Structures are given as C-alpha cells and as structure tokens.
Image (cartoon, rainbow, N blue to C red):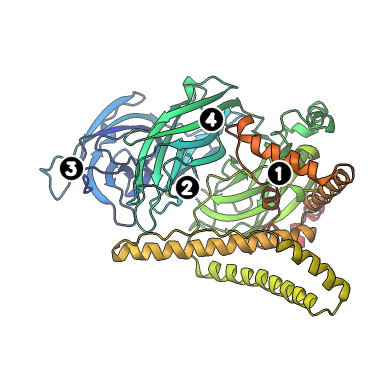
Amino acid sequence: MYQLDITLRRGQSLAARDRGGTSDPYVKFKIGGKEVFRSKIIHKSLNPVWEEKACLLVEHLKEPLYIKVFDYDFGLQDDFMGSAFLDLTQLELNRPTDVTVTLKDPHYPDHDLGIILLSVVLTPKEGEHRDVTMLMRKSWKRSSKFQTQSLRLSDIHRKPHLWRGIVSITLIEGRDLKAMDSNGLSDPYVKFRLGHQKYKSKIMPKTLNPQWREQFDFHLYEERGGIIDITAWDKDAGKRDDFIGRCQIDLSALSREQTHKLELQLEEGEGHLVLLVTLTASATVSISDLSINSLEDPKEREEILKRYSPLRIFHNLKDVGFLQVKVIRAEGLMAADVTGKSDPFCVVELNNDRLLTHTVYKNLNPEWNKVFTFNIKDIHSVLEVTVYDEDRDRSADFLGKVAIPLLSIQNGEQKAYVLKNKQLTGPTKGVIYLEIDVIFNAVKASLRTLIPKEQKYIEEENRLSKQLLLRNFIRMKRCVMVLVNAAYYINSCFDWDSPARSLAAFVVVEDMLEDEEEEDDKDDKDSEKKGFINKIYAIQEVCISVQNILDEVASFGERIKNTFNWTIPFLSWLAIVALCAFTVILYFIPLRYIVLVWGINKFTKKLRSPYAIDNNELLDFLSRVPSDVQVVQYQELKPDPSHSPCKRKKNNLG
C-alpha cells in the first residue's frame, strides 16, 4: 500500500472549447478505472491555477494515474480537453517531484492541447495502523450537488482541535458591477470557497450596486491561514449564469481578533466587493475517547457551569452553551458490502461543525466509544448523527441518520435512537446508542433567537420532486382553509348574529379604511428567444420556484400554529414573557413615546452602524419554530424493547 500526495498546480496553453475562445477547465484523476479526485472549475481561462491537494491510496504501482481535463458546460455534456498518464513506477519514494504532463487526444495525437503541472510524493504505507478515520471532502459536482470523497488518515495524526480558528465574513455590498443583461443591469450573487467549505449568497435582482448584508463563518484549519476564493455571477434563468469577476483574500495577511474592512477589486471583470472579515480563535471543539470526559471531571464541569451561569449574560453573546455527545455503539446496521458486512463510521454535525469517528471494519454492531464536544451558538440547532459505510474506491454509502433538537435532549441519559432514512421520514435498519449533555445560558439563548439563523453551507440545492410538490400543495391548502374559515367568521360579524362581536368588527374596519393601500409594480421582463433545452431548464426552474414558495408559505403558517400549540415550550414561554414585558411597558409608558423611540432607532441605525445586517426579529423568532414537516423529521421513533440499554446490561449479567 502506498500513499500518493498530489498537488495540482496549474495548466498552460489549454485548448479553447467555448465560443469566446476560452474554456472552463477542471481535472479528474483516475486509478484502475475509478475516479479518485475532481478539481474545482476555473472559469474562462486557458492558463488555470488550481493549487489543490489530493491524498490517494494506491495498492498497485503498475496501475498508472490517468489524468483527464474537461471543459465545464452547464446543462450539456462537458467537452474533452485532453488526457495523460503518469507512470507511478518511475517515481522515487519519499521524494517530492515536479511533473509536467502533456495533454493529448487519442483520436488526434498530433494536436497540441497544452500541459498540466503537478507536484507528487509517493510514500510507502506502514501496515500497523488499523484504527483509521475518514475525513469527508465535499466538492461540487456538475449538478450542483455535493459528491463525497474519502481520505484516510491514521488516528494518531489527528489533533484534539480539528480547526484552529473561525473566519467570520460579512458580505456588505457590491459597487459598479458589470452589466450582463440586455437591460443594462445584472442579477448578481457571490460564491465563496475556503478549501472544501463553500457559501453562496442570495441573488439581488436588477442592480449593479447590490446590498447583501449577509454574515457567515468558515473554519480555519491552517495556522498560517489560507486563501478564500471569491467569484461574482449574474443569475440567468434557464441558461448558464454569466461570470462577472473574481478576487481572493489571503488570510495570512490579516491580524487576529480584529475586524478588517476590505474593498476588493474584481479581476476579469468590473466593480468592487465590500466585506468585513474577522479571524478569531477556535472554541473548544474536540474528539476524545470515552475515558476522557469533560463533564465527569468535577473541576471541568464546575468551570463549564460557571461559564454559562446567569451572571455571565453579556460575556460573549455568541457562546450560548456547551454540548457533549458520547457516540457509544450501533446495533443491527444494514449490510452494505457483498460480504454481508459493513465498514461503519459516524458523522456528528451541529450546524456547520462536523466531526467524525474512526471506522470499524467488517462489523454490523460497531463500538466507537468516542466523546465529541461542541460550542452551541443557537440553542434551537439540531444535532445530526449519520452512519456511513466506508468504501475506499467510491463515495461512502448511507446507512442511517437521526436528527435531535438540542432542546429535546435529556442530560446524561443513554438512549437507543432508531436510525432513519435520508429524508428522516421513516425508519431504516439499526439503532445507535448516544448519551448527550447540554448546558446553556437561557438568557443568551433567548437573545440569540431574535437574530438571523445560521445557514448551513453544505446543504444540497432543492430539486424538482412531484411528491414534494404535491405535499407542499396539500400543506398550502390547509393554510388556505384556515384563512377561509377565518373569512367565514369575519363574514358572520357583518350578519349581526352577535351584536357585541359585530360592533367590535365595525370599529376595527373603520380604522383600517383610513390607511392607504400600497401596490407593488411588477416589471415585465423582456422575452428572449431560447432554444429547446433552455426552455426545459426555464420550466424546471419555475416549477422549483413554485415548489419552494409553497413550502415557505405553508411553513410560515405551520410555525405560527406550532407557536400557539406549544410544540417547543421554550419558544412559547419566550413569546409569553415578551408579550407580558411589552404589556407592562405600555402600562407605564405611552404608546406614542414607544413608537417615537422605535422610529428614531430604525432611522438612525444605518448612521450608528453602517454595516449592520438588517433583520426582522419576529421572522427570526418564527424561523426557530419547526414546521409540521420538521416536527415529523425530529420525532423520535420507539426502538425495539430488545435494544434497551438496561435490558442489555441484565442479559450480560445473566
């Protein structure tokens, strides 16, 4: 067994495959006919620079590394740009080697298709390390879906803190961006990439000076920092998005614990992007063995309880609480291999924090006995534990998953959770034993409820689904029926069935008629001639938009209902406390003064904090309330009584 470390440097004088005389190249590595690596796409360049690293395991050096280069085409088959073979038997062991490979087309061997520059190191692997882990590397596929690729590392090389810091990025605005549409405007959005981490901003329609005001975090894995790649795009419905420009941020040049305002000039385009970037030290996120337990050490437990005591309300508002997850074992897992066994490992996720266990080979009842610790930023987050089967030659196979809201956790209780399918709608084979502890500051958690929810940057894009579209339509129909019933009730007020109720309705309607109604003007978009394929994509995008709008509207109504249904008692109590506090304030302070203070705060907010992120506290509150679909997904299934931990202990004693 050998380890092949490859650094994909750059390409030179590659073939032009697009009408503009450029290409959008990316590179594939194959060994033994199986794809083991795929690079990112470099848009509109014949001399692309990748600087990407890949770590591959090779069993037989006689099988060469097959290098293929393609031109990315949205919605169409990618164009072949050339290929080459690297003979691994010619490499010296343990010695870094710079390699230049010449791209050729087997059908046209005389054509000059450019060169690819690599740096490679071939190292023999020792056979002693059996306890290995698998780190998941996420990379975009052409369908904008994530493809899971595996990378094995010995457990002894893992460090207790898997990331060394946090990069907080606030995308403020764009200035004087390039017009890409026929109306002289653009529909810009921005993509960020740091290693395997990616984030995509929202789309700002019809503007060259967009105001995003979006904040997100990346994990910083390297001490010296890293390079954040930023690309700006113009959204085009039904056809390929237009490239506006690119820029980079060298994190090694920024000082720590300080907010930097950056105005970045877009290369290969026009305009600027304005960002705020802050580098901070990482909170305690770790993996350890079951014998090393923070909460079982009296001193450490006391320190954690003190950190989140009610007296430390205004100390680091982002640090809401502490989560400890013991991943003990699983039983009765699905057999994913042809041998009737699996090679299971476990992924523990809290928002964008993602840690993994080691792999237990050829076992359907694995024991991991690992302890994971996380810092809680939002008490309404959901802990996701997923079990995969490791497959060295291809992406990992899904075995089961559970989603556990932090507010539903009972501290210190070892429970058997029934594994569910990918959609979390029904059970699959097997159970997993977890013991979870949550410690948090209730006041901090309440305040964080009123700010925007953190977005997951590894979520897959929504796809068109007939079943999902029908389900959202039914959910929407229920909400509409509630409104119809409310309309019947209002109509009964005008029939004077109840004089008192009708009189109250008359007073309310009279006040409403005094307000002026506003109507939004809808701009008609210029129709363009599109090909058959573009029309299909346009129809698909419209259907996906309808599907998403139905989901949003239905979820909004369901969240309001679930607030009054006490689905999440913490949120319902928070709403009651807020209403009571507002009532007391109204009793002592006239309403006009409250409106005056609110108006002054609203209109001077931009002056006091020009780069503040706009938010609506009521909508942020409702975003924490689960919809009916989420309630089903988070519902805990009852395990078979034979999987009870207590019964297992009795059987062992017997």
Disc sitting over residue 450 in the figure: 1
Q: On the image, numbered disc 2 is attached to which residue?
A: 204
Q: 10 Å neighbourhood of mark 2: few (<14), some, or many (≥20)?
A: some
SS under mark 1: loop
- Tell me the distance, in whole angstroms, between the alpha carbons under discs 2 and 3: 42 Å
* Numbered disc in front, either 3 or 1: 1
Give, as a three-letter code, the residue at label 1.
Answer: Leu
**Foreground disc of the pair 3, 4:** 4
Q: Is residue 40 left or right of residue 401?
A: left
Considering only order in the chain, which callout, 1 or 3, is on the residue closer to the N terminus? Answer: 3
Say which label, 2 or 1, has the lower sequence index.
Answer: 2
Residue underneath mark 3 = 104
Looking at the image, tell me whether mark 3 or mark 4 is earlier in sequence order.
3
Whole-Å distance between the Cαs marked 3 and 4? 45 Å
At which x and y percent is residue 418? 68, 58
- The residue tagged 4 is 276
Residue 484 placement: quadrant: bottom right
Three-letter code for the amino acid on which mark 4 is drawn: Leu
Taking depth in this image into account, of 76 and 51 the one nearest to the observer is 76
Q: Position of residue 637 (x, y in %)?
A: 72, 61
Pick the quarter of the image with the N terminus.
top left
Q: Distance between the residues labelled 1 and 4?
A: 22 Å
Q: Measured along the vertical axis of the image, is residue 590 above or below residue 12?
A: below
Q: Which amino acid lies under the numbered mark 3 shown in the image of this protein? A: Lys
Q: Which of 96 and 117 is in front in this view?
A: 117
Q: Position of residue 351 (x, y in %)?
A: 62, 44
Kind of residue at disc 2: Met
As helix, strand or loop, the secondary structure at mark 4 comes to strand
Contact, mark 2 vs mark 3 (Cβ under 8 Å)? no
Question: Going from the N terminus, do you reach mark 1 or mark 4 first?
Answer: 4
